[in-house]
Amino acid sequence: MKKHLVRVYPSKEKLDRKDQLAWKMAEIATDNAPIKADVLDMVINRIIDNASVAIASANRRPVASARAMAIAHPRNGGATVFGMPNSQKFDCEWAAWANGTAVRELDYHDTFLAADYSHPGDNIPPILAVAQQMNKGGKDLLRGIVTGYELHVDLVKAICLHKHKKDHIAHLCPASAAGIGTLLGLPTETVYQAIQQAVHVSFNTRQSRKGEISSWKAYAPAHSSKLAIEAVDRVMRGEGAPSPIYEGEDSVIAYMLDGKDGKYEVPLPEVGEEKRAILETYTKEHSAEYQSQALIDLARKMKQKITNFEDIQSIVIHTSHHTHYVIGTGAGDPQKMDPNASRETLDHSIMYIFAVALQDGEWHHVKSYAPERARREDTVRLWHKISTVEDPQWTQWYHEQDPNKKRFGGRVEITFKNGQKLVDELGVADAHPAGARPFKRADYIRKFDILTSEIITKDERNRFISLVENLQDLTPAQIQELNVQIPIDKLINNKRDTKGIF
């Protein structure tokens, strides 16, 4: 790996193309670096993971709406949509829209946290959709996904978007565009322009994750998918993009990030070096924001030492800056304490999550968010006794460059009315690579089986798992079958409607 200094250049100070971050990313996307067995294995795991959470969310309103929009764009030889029959194909950008929404809806797939946040699995829907439409095989799909993960993780390691209240799809979109470029075997020049276009159109504010959080949180990466596919299509036709997109005098660093004096060091593999960033990412055992994963596991443990929740005076969670200000009381969002809040808002309230996990000793992707669960009087009382504070030590651990030293949890102090205290801490979730029970292939398949139970048939389950486990050797025809089908009578919004414009 090599760190590349990225800063703003005045227009009069010409920056050679080869020295621009977008060009360096494109060079990585268009090399022919080897892919080892452990990386292949993890790509398969993440395709399974994406499918499991997508099928579990198939009939939730945002996902059903996205699917209805995709169904309005049929295309012979196009891409498949989660849940729909493999015989029905749709324009790849709309398939990516529907599938990206399904994957993101439950906030239950993989994550990487560093200078910023990310869900690198969001790269898979657009790259897979384009692979299906463009008749690509397993080796091409594998290479495209590995590129998407690599560049996404590398950007997240170096450039903080949250500090400037920018949504994290600004790193996702160029990574997906680069991954599509790798998939299609495009020239470096074409991928370079696609990356720049993707960056240019994908900067949005973080209001989507603030206050009254709506279903747009699920749609945001799907929107990124469409933007990435359209960016690649446009430059394949010979068109260019704003340049230099990162370093320009009026570009994103200068006016959306750290400003004209801003400097970043972005780590990238050398040309020809293995892309292994996917191995630094981690999935979720629990359907909740990633900073809550370790705290859910800690709540399950601490529950065993509590006999009466009414005896609790207060609960203080000492944690990182990100956890405190994004999902804690540091956000200043009254909605995070509201029993009538949306699922999306509750998912971003560690106070609610910890209260329910402490009482129930478990976390369920449906039951834990049910309105009747959130409104239970004893839960509300406990919930409102919980607060967070930033602990500099946990913030430092959160930003550790060494993945083996990163910690995303916190220290919890429960004070009882009699003055006694119960104190414990947990740094990483049990399912994390450094956790008590790191997820392996069997865990991904178990998660798939739990989430798709009573939704898909046993034959369909076996067909999909068998297919994806042979990823590298799949033919283009088999890639077009890389989808999980739901019996049509169990799938709402399974045909074209007249509710919208399309």
Image: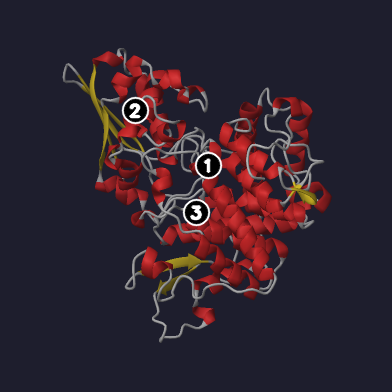
**Residue 387 relative to residue 501: left or right:** left
Location of residue 334 by image quarter = top left
Q: State whether residue 239 appears in this view.
A: yes
Q: Residue 137 location, x and y as percent? A: 78, 55
Q: Residue 25: image x %, image y %? A: 55, 68
Q: Is residue 273 above or below residue 453?
A: below
Density class for disc 3 (Cα within 10 Å; few <14, some 14-19, many ≥20) is many
Three-letter residue code for mark 2 = Asp
Q: Is residue 319 above or below residue 147?
A: above
In this rendering, position of residue 259 left or right of residue 87: left
Query: In the depicted view, which residue is nearer to us: 304 or 454?
Result: 454
Kindly indicate whether the residue at mark 2 contacts the one at mark 1 (C-beta within 8 angstroms). Answer: no
Quarter of the image holding residue 224? bottom right
**Residue at the disc numbered 2:** 338
Tag shown at residue 218: 1
Outermost left residue: 419
